[in-house]
Image (spheres, helix red, strand yellow):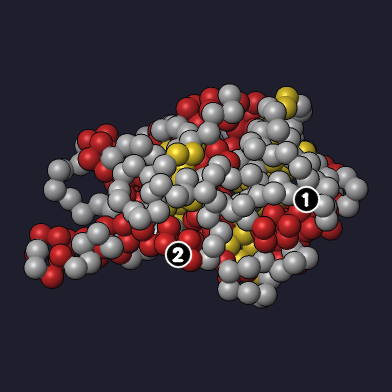
Amino acid sequence: MERKVAITGLGIVSAIGMDVQENYNSLISKKDGISRVENFSTIHKEVIKVGEIKLTNEELIDKLGLPKINNYSRTALLAEVAALEAVEDAGIQNIQAYKTGFISSTSVGGMDMTERYFYSCVENKEERRYIPTHSAGDATSKVARRLGITEFVTTISTACSSATNAIMLGARMIKAGKLDRVIVGGADCLSKFTINGFKTLMILSEDNCRPFDKDRTGLNLGEAAAFLVLEAEDIAIKEGKNILAYVSGYANANDAFHQTASSGDGEGAGLAMEQALKVAGLHPSEIDYINAHGTATANNDLSESMAIVRVFKNEVPDISSTKAFTGHTLAAAGAIEAIYSVLALQNNIVFPNLNFENSIEETKIKPITEPLEKELNHVLSNSFGFGGNCASVIFSKAN
């Protein structure tokens, strides 16, 4: 009999909170975390808005009890804060008691440090300690060491679908019996590289982003980290764990359309949603809420909404994008929104889509704009990345 994948722990740090409870409080009170850049210098500082975590690296180092002199990138610092909360929330006392894996994801990696010291490290030997942190796997390795995980450790980097793919891989490994539990998620920090890159693509908004609005002007970049503890249901029950929700469906598909743009009809997005429904054994009408990718760019929101209409036809569920709260947190986005999906199930609430006024003409989709209390049993979360990498995951209520 195929193992069911239970979620037993959550950990998150974002622009709207340093833990799960703070994030939930911000969501239901419509308190966004969008602001100007404060933690580093950029020529775009007064032009764009971002979802920045206001704790400095030094404050994060103190929070984690790390030595003052270390080679942690900001991505690694954020990841460790969130992962420790998730493990504590799951009540894991002995990480080695079961076959445990760690699957993290990132796009930025440690480039916030390597871009800072790129020139000066030639002369300053002390700064060269950050060179190894540039690797996408560095933060993963550091957090795995802190947690004591050695069974299986890997990093996924598929742009903005990375953390959702990490969740999918973790769930599949548990179902296959390769692991008994796995901590999955992702982390990304703000950096000059990403700000300049997205500015070059001309998809950054100079104001608070407006997902699914006809007059949307682009996205707000954000930084965050989030991790979920997945466990085989039989082990979670044996250990007397509080099961928060289940990972019931998942899928990955590809548009094969463009390096940075989604196809106009959202073919890859549609395929990912359809296959996730098949894996979960659900009919489209059984989805109660869609936590959309919803980046507030002209291309994504039209493409995603076209795909949603194609899959759900005249029965589009309640839908919202939470990126107007946190900004687009790149590789971490799928884990951030996975946690929001679990919180929605636990509290029977659809979180609001901020700053929406007018529907996209082609699809007429109207997202939920105020917190909506209703019975939720299944939530679909979408994450679509550059390179056409589309991923969807379905979370189901623990009865």
Q: Gap in Å between the C-alphas at discs 1 and 2? A: 27 Å
- What secondary structure is marked by label 2? helix
Between residue 4 and residue 191, name the one nearer to us: 191
* Disc on res. 339: none
Residue furthest right as drawn: 314
- What secondary structure is marked by label 1? loop
- Tell me what residue is drawn at x 47 percent, y 45 percent: 49
x then y, percent, for residue 318: 77, 38
Q: Is residue 111 left or right of residue 379?
A: left
Q: Quadrant of residue 117?
A: bottom left
Which part of the image, by quadrant, shows the C terminus?
top right
Q: Quadrant of residue 168?
A: bottom right
Residue 264 seen anywhere in this rendered image of the structure: yes
Q: Amino acid at mark 2?
A: Gly
- Tell me what residue is drawn at x 74 percent, y 64 percent: 266
x then y, percent, for residue 207: 54, 44
Q: Amino acid at mark 1?
A: Ile
User: What residue is shown with label 1?
Assistant: 360
- Tell me what residue is drawn at x 28 percent, y 63 percent: 115
Residue 395 seen anywhere in this rendered image of the structure: no
- Tell me what residue is drawn at x 65 percent, y 46 percent: 211
Disc nearer the start of the sequence (1/2)? 2
Q: Is residue 179 above or below residue 13?
A: below
